[in-house]
Amino acid sequence: MQLKRQEVLELFCSSVDNAYYLYQTASETALHLKNKKYPSLGLAELALEELGKSYSCLAMYSKADTTKDWTAFWKEWRQHDLKAHRAFFYEFFCLTRIEIEFGDKELKFPTIRQSFSKEKEVAFYVDIDKGNRKIHKPDTDISDEECLRRVTSLVGLFSAAFYIRDWLRESNSEDFKNAISDYADLTLTTEMYQQDVLGVLAKMKEDNSEYNKGLDKIIDLFTNDETKPK
């Protein structure tokens, strides 16, 4: 199935919006429910996957009309762990990251579980370990600290996603939008680190004022003192 640019844009915006609703529900559960907060871990994980899905759409937007083979896109669309990991690529747009320290080394970033999908699974399901016959019960095996850590880890990612969503929803030119999308695609297809961001953006500059305007928006967001980690 080939998508049109407008469809990709709608999928991007809708994925961000849905991710935020899942995050809000997870946050309400983690912060205000007096006991049995464990579903918030799985809900936050679902929000993380939706954010990762939105990033895939963002990277595809500029080349939607010229891409003939969408096999890779739809394959990634179904890979839960890939989508969860991909959500953190929003840190290439904004440096904000909020983490809660509990003095427990096991709660370090990004997850204490075998994978992100495992983190989601243990939050929702009772299971039994076939090796040691230990029965896993979410209400006793998921700590409130783990739930809070995952929920708060999403805040910085949404900071970037909301800015980008608003940029693309505004009546900016296609060249402007292509610049945002091309940069997202570069973060996925090249080996780069946060210290490389400004250099990569400088090399992307063209003899096109609208395209460069989009790149400057990213530079402003990435270098904003208010978004830098304290």
Image (cartoon, grey):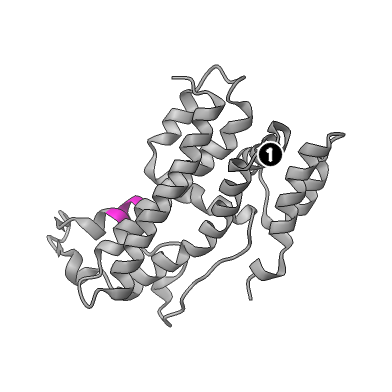
Quarter of the N terminus within the rendering: top left
- Residue 24 horizontal/vertical position (percent): 37, 61
- Farthest residue in the right direction? 207
Residue in front for this viewpoint, 183 or 138: 183
Q: Residue at x 69, y 32 (%)?
A: 174
Which portion, as a residue range, is magenta? 116-120
Residue 109, position in %: x, y? Answer: 47, 66
Q: Does residue 70 appear in the picture of this structure? A: yes
**Place of residue 107 in the rendered image (x, y in percent of width and height, measured from the top left):** 40, 72
Q: Residue at x 15, y 61 (%)?
A: 132
Image quarter hosting the C terminus: bottom right
Residue 192 on the magenta segment: no
Q: Quadrant of residue 137?
A: bottom left
Relative to the observer, which residue lies in front, 34 or 131?
34
Up/down of 92 relative to 211, above or below: below
Left or right of 37? Residue 93 is right
Q: Amino acid at mark 1?
A: Asn
- Which residue shows up at 41% across the image and 81% down it? 102
- Answer above or below: position of 89 versus 175: below
17 on left or right of 144: right
Q: Main secondary structure of the magenta part?
A: helix
* The quarter of the displayed image where residue 138 is located: bottom left
Is 208 or 45 nearer to us in this picture? Answer: 208
- Structural crowding at the residue carrying mark 1, measured as other residues with C-alpha within 10 Å and reported as few (<14), some (14–19) or many (≥20): few
User: Measuring 71% from the left and 64% from the top, which residue is drawn there?
Assistant: 224
**Residue marked by disc 1:** 172
